[in-house]
Image (cartoon, rainbow, N blue to C red):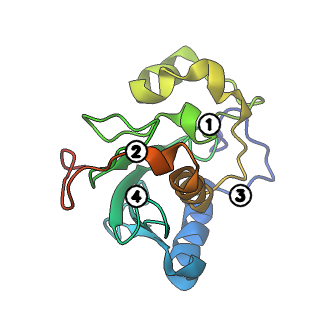
Amino acid sequence: MSATPPGAREDDVPRNLRLLEELVEGQERSWGSTLRWGLVRDDDLSLWSALIIGPRKTPFADRVYSLGVVCGSAYPYVVTEVRFVSGINLDGVDQVTGVVDPKYCGLRVNKRHKLRPLDLKRLNTTVLGAVPLLNEWKILYRILDVLLDLQRKMESEESKRLVQPPRGSLFEPF
């Protein structure tokens, strides 16, 4: 049985190597000191934690937002699941669970990647709810791209009008 996921090319970077590169990127680069990400546990490349410092001159300023990121077994061919732990009022974030709806931040499945029915059963239903919009995910996207996109959404004009929950508010634990 081939270790190459469906839709992958033989010259694609293996999942674990890709995730290790992203780990190094999250630990060694500063990204303007506004983004951080790393593993929840050293022995599990699937579960990540991330921090976004709220952009200046927005309702998110002077706040640190904690997120959970899950890179499933089909990553990078299938979008990551992203969930805010810190309370936030932002379009595309479920106000009960904190889950980020992929259609709001450019998170999509690569067109060349064909999922089989068994694969679909294993995916999170939050991601499947936006399947028609998941056709543009590129395997080159990284956790950093997701965080930057969320940060840009915080800086958008429509987000600047959103009233934020009290400091210290949390969604259910990740």
Label 4: state its secondary structure: loop
Which mark, residue 13? 3
Q: Position of residue 116 (x, y in %)?
A: 59, 19
Disc 3/disc 4 C-alpha distance (Å): 39 Å
- Above or below, 35 relative to 89: below
Visible residue check, residue 31: yes
Which numbered disc flags the more N-terminal residue, 1 or 2?
Answer: 1
Asked if the residues shown at circle 1 and circle 4 are in contact, with their CB atoms under 8 angstroms apart, the answer is no
Say which of marks 3 and 2 sits in front: 2
Q: Which residue is mark 4?
A: 59
Visible residue check, residue 71: no
The type of residue carrying mark 3 is: Val
Asked if the residues shown at circle 3 and circle 1 are in contact, with their CB atoms under 8 angstroms apart, the answer is no
Asked if the residues shown at circle 2 and circle 4 are in contact, with their CB atoms under 8 angstroms apart, the answer is yes
Label 2: state its secondary structure: loop
Tell whether 51 sits left or right of 147.
Answer: left
Tell whether 21 sits left or right of 69.
Answer: right
Label 3: state its secondary structure: loop
Q: Position of residue 66 (x, y in %)?
A: 33, 61
Q: Position of residue 147 (x, y in %)?
A: 53, 58
Asked if the residues shown at circle 3 and circle 4 are in contact, with their CB atoms under 8 angstroms apart, the answer is no
- Above or below, 72 relative to 145: above
The type of residue carrying mark 4 is: Pro
Q: Which residue is mark 1?
A: 1
- What residue is at 36 percent from the left and 56 percent from the top? 67
The type of residue carrying mark 2 is: Leu
Q: Are there few (<14), some (14-19), or many (20+) residues within 10 Å of tag 1?
A: few
Asked if the residues shown at circle 3 and circle 2 are in contact, with their CB atoms under 8 angstroms apart, the answer is no
Disc 2/disc 4 C-alpha distance (Å): 7 Å
Which numbered disc flags the more N-terminal residue, 3 or 2?
Answer: 3
Disc 3/disc 2 C-alpha distance (Å): 40 Å
